[in-house]
Amino acid sequence: MYKLFLTRHGETIWNTERRMQGHNNSPLSELGIKQANWLFDRLKDENIDVVLSSPLGRALQTADVLISNRAIEIVIVDELKEINLGCWEGCRSEVVERDFPHEYYCFWNEPHNYVPIDGESFEELKKRAKYFLHTILPKYKEKNVLIVAHAVVIKVLLNVIETKGEISRLWEGTPIFPTSLSTLKVKNDKIQIDCIGDTSHYKEKLKSGWFSEEELDQK
């Protein structure tokens, strides 16, 4: 048996501005750096053998904080990139909602019906997620792995594990907050989810970004 630790990067400047990120990048905010350090404190006594990280800067910046001075290899994995949002990237969410109302609605409410303008569909992202789970991850069998990625790709990875990839159910369950921690165990090639999106290591409440007041009140 071995463990998987799955986390999202820390809060970014664009998160606070409600900008769509996708394959574009924005550096961690001051709070995002704090979040990464809080998670470092939580994980510092865990036996982590390798880090698999998205190549995007916000994920690598988070990974660097999480391993700090520990001699742990960071392996860049393209399949862990965030969903490609095409022409939406860098735009504020309210602008995207105004200019692409149908596509924006489907993205958040009917993901199985979402057809991107020039980016990536959820089905295409699901193929990436399956390739990661079935082809890349087994290369690290019997190693405890820390995975640093992004909100949507994490939701899709968990969706594939929990529902075999029913994209209509993508947004069900716990939101993936910055540096939230999902823990999984792999035994006899079967992945078991222990917890999703845990933020018990947070020392400050989230104050901005993509989340509703109700969601923020839960933190």
Image: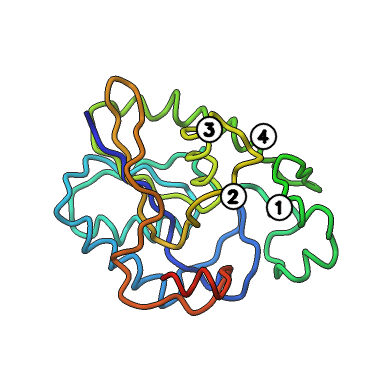
Cα–Cα gap, marks 1 and 3: 18 Å
Cα–Cα gap, marks 2 and 4: 14 Å
Cα–Cα gap, marks 4 and 3: 14 Å
Of the numbered discs 2 and 4, the one sitting upstream in the chain is: 4
Position in image of residue 88 (x %, y %)? 73, 59
Residue type at mark 1? Asn
Nearer mark to the viewer, of 4 and 3: 3
Is 149 situated left or right of 37 in this image?
right
- Residue farthest left in this picture: 45
Q: How many marks?
A: 4
Residue type at mark 2? Trp
Of the numbered discs 2 and 3, the one sitting upstream in the chain is: 3
Position in image of residue 29 (x %, y %)? 46, 74
Quadrant of residue 15 within the rendered picture: bottom right
Of the numbered discs 4 and 3, the one sitting upstream in the chain is: 4
Residue type at mark 4? Glu
Nearer mark to the viewer, of 2 and 4: 2
Of the numbered discs 1 and 3, the one sitting upstream in the chain is: 1
The residue tagged 2 is 171
Label 2 element class: loop
Is 219 situated left or right of 214 in this image?
left
The residue tagged 4 is 123
Quadrant of residue 113 within the rendered picture: top right
Viewer-proximal residue among 187 and 144 = 187
Q: Are marks 1 and 2 in contact (CB under 8 Å)?
A: yes
Residue count near mark 1 (Cα–Cα under 10 Å), binned few <14, some 14–19, many ≥20: some
Of the numbered discs 1 and 4, the one sitting upstream in the chain is: 1
Residue count near mark 3 (Cα–Cα under 10 Å), binned few <14, some 14–19, many ≥20: few
The residue tagged 1 is 109
Cα–Cα gap, marks 1 and 4: 15 Å
The residue tagged 3 is 163
Position in image of residue 144 (x %, y %)? 24, 38
